[in-house]
Each structure stands twice: as structure tokens, then as C-alpha cells.
């Protein structure tokens, strides 16, 4: 957790671009939320056209923070794909931490990551 699903036409997505997008999404998520990078998962699927990112993130983040994250991810994906940001759609969906497990343990609430990692180690 979080899980980001990137739907991008395979013709626009070589391995370096895939790595760059995954790195950018992970970096942005961690910088904005304080969550450790071990929690982030970025998956890719082929799409007929366009570019979209749907992220399932732990609930409890403010609307303004989610908007900042979505905006930064939109810009990063657009830059990597060399397209206008208006052609990239990013949607963040909130999921209660108690609904998600990482490494066999229920995820912590936002802000409780350090204690969780101390008890469970990294994912």
C-alpha cells in the first residue's frame, strides 16, 4: 500500500520510461506523505490510448494534499511521456488502512509508519 495502477499505451512506454514513472510516483508519494518507499507499489497495464494513473492510498490525507500529489504525478507522467499534462489523468482513491495488509500485517494509520516498521520490519 499504496498501489498505483498506470494505464498507458505500450507503444509509448519503454523500460526506461516505465522505471522513471515508477520512480517519480514513489518519490512524490513519499515526499508528500512521509510514508517509506517500501510501501509504494506501481503497476502498469496496456491502454488503447491516453494515460491514466489510479492510486489507492490510505485514507486520512487532506484534500489539498491529495490534490498536490495528483498534480505532481500528472506533471511527472506527462514529462516522461512527452505529452501535455491535460492528456494525463490521475485519480487518488482513499482506502482505510485497516483494509490493507503489507507483509502479513495490517497497515498503520498515516503518521504511524515508524512504529509499524519497528514492529514488523520493512516490506
Image: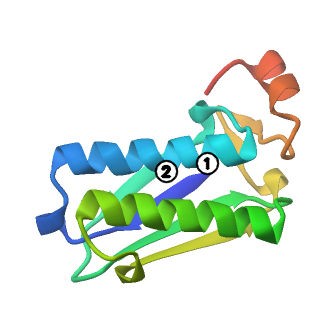
Task: Indicate whether 75 appears above or below 1.
Answer: below
Seen at 71% across and 18% down, the residue is: 121
Residue nearest the viewer, comparing 63 with 36: 63
103 to 27, vertically: above or below: above
Q: Position of residue 86 (x, y in %)?
A: 40, 83
**Quarter of the picture holding the C terminus:** top right
Residue that mark 2 sits on: 25
Q: Confirm or deny contact between disc 1 and disc 2 (CB under 8 A).
A: yes
Q: How is the image coloured?
A: rainbow
Residue 7 vertical position relative to residue 43 in the rendered view, above or below: below
Label 2 crowding class (10 Å Cα cut-off): few <14, some 14-19, many 20+? many
Most foreground residue, 93 or 73: 73
| Residue corresponding to mark 1 | 29
Which residue is at a point 80% across and 71% down the rendered structure image? Answer: 63
Please, is residue 21 above or below residue 36 in the view? below
Could you tell me which secondary element the residue under label 1 belongs to? helix
Residue drawn at x 20%, y 43% is: 16
Q: Residue 62: horizontal and vertical position, in percent?
A: 84, 64
Amino acid at each position: 500500500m499504496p498501489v498505483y495502477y498506470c494505464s498507458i499505451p505500450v507503444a509509448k512506454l519503454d523500460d526506461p520510461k516505465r522505471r522513471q514513472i515508477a520512480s517519480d510516483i514513489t518519490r512524490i508519494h513519499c515526499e508528500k506523505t512521509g510514508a517509506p518507499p517500501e510501501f509504494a507499489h506501481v503497476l502498469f497495464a496496456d491502454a488503447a490510448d491516453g494515460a491514466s494513473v489510479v492510486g489507492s492510498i490510505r485514507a486520512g490525507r487532506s484534500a489539498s494534499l491529495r490534490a498536490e500529489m495528483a498534480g505532481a504525478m500528472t506533471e511527472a507522467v506527462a514529462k516522461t511521456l512527452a505529452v501535455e499534462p491535460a492528456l494525463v489523468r490521475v485519480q487518488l482513491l482513499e482506502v482505510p488502512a485497516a483494509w490493507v495488509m503489507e507483509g502479513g500485517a495490517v497497515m498503520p494509520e498515516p503518521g504511524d509508519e515508524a512504529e509499524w516498521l519497528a514492529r514488523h520490519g520493512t516490506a
